[in-house]
Amino acid sequence: MPAFRAFLRTHRRLALGLVALALILKALIPAGYMLSDTAHVLTVTICGDASGQPLVKHIAVPAKGAPDHAKGQEGCAWGLLAWAALPGADLVLLAAALAFILALGFVPVRPAPPSRGFHLRPPLRGPPAFA
């Protein structure tokens, strides 16, 4: 790990380029894009919506040997990721919450009251003898 960190420190532009490439690919490739391997056909499965029904495109590929496992057509494994994009509340309520948060940014801030100093020694005079 230290050698890898040293490599990244000496090649900063390469590291930043790889991070930028990863972010660009994440932005361009739709959510739910996955490859499935079945017999001798490459199946590209795209989760089109949050219902769990995948959109399937079959591409014939000559393969050598048998596949390790064959998957059935169950629900889309990545379909539930789209649920995070769905709003959890009405748009009016979300707009009111955002307006409230923005309004809090313009509220004047009261300074904290000055605190009493910390004394290492007792006061010079004590309380009166006869109060």
Image (cartoon, rainbow, N blue to C red):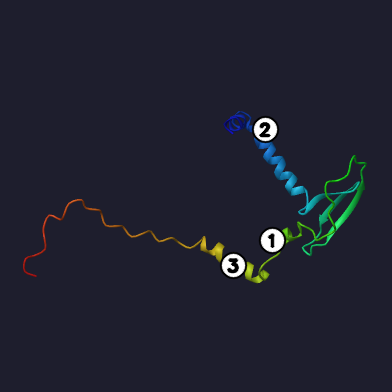
Residue 115 found in image quarter: bottom left
At label 3, the amino acid type is Ala
Frontmost residue, 37 versus 114: 37
Q: Secondary structure at mark 2?
A: helix
**Residue found at x 69% / y 41%:** 20
Instruction: Find disc 2 in the rendering and name its residue.
Output: 14
Instruction: Find disc 3 in the rendering and name its residue.
Output: 97
Nearest to N terminus: mark 3 or mark 2:
2
Horizontal side, residue 54 vs residue 95: left or right: right
Seen in the picture, residue 27 relative to 88 is either above or below; the reply is above
Give percent across and percent down for residue 90: 67, 71
Horizontal side, residue 93 vs residue 127: left or right: right
State which mark lies toward you, 1 or 3: 1
Instruction: Find disc 1 in the rendering and name its residue.
Output: 84
For label 2, the crowd category at 10 Å Cα-Cα, with few meaning under 14, some 14 to 19 and many 20 or more, is few
Q: Secondary structure at mark 1?
A: helix
Residue 94: which numbered mark, if any? none
- Report, in whole angstroms, how far the alpha carbon at label 1 lies from the one at label 3: 19 Å
At label 1, the amino acid type is Ala
At label 2, the amino acid type is Leu
**Residue found at x 79% / y 51%:** 33
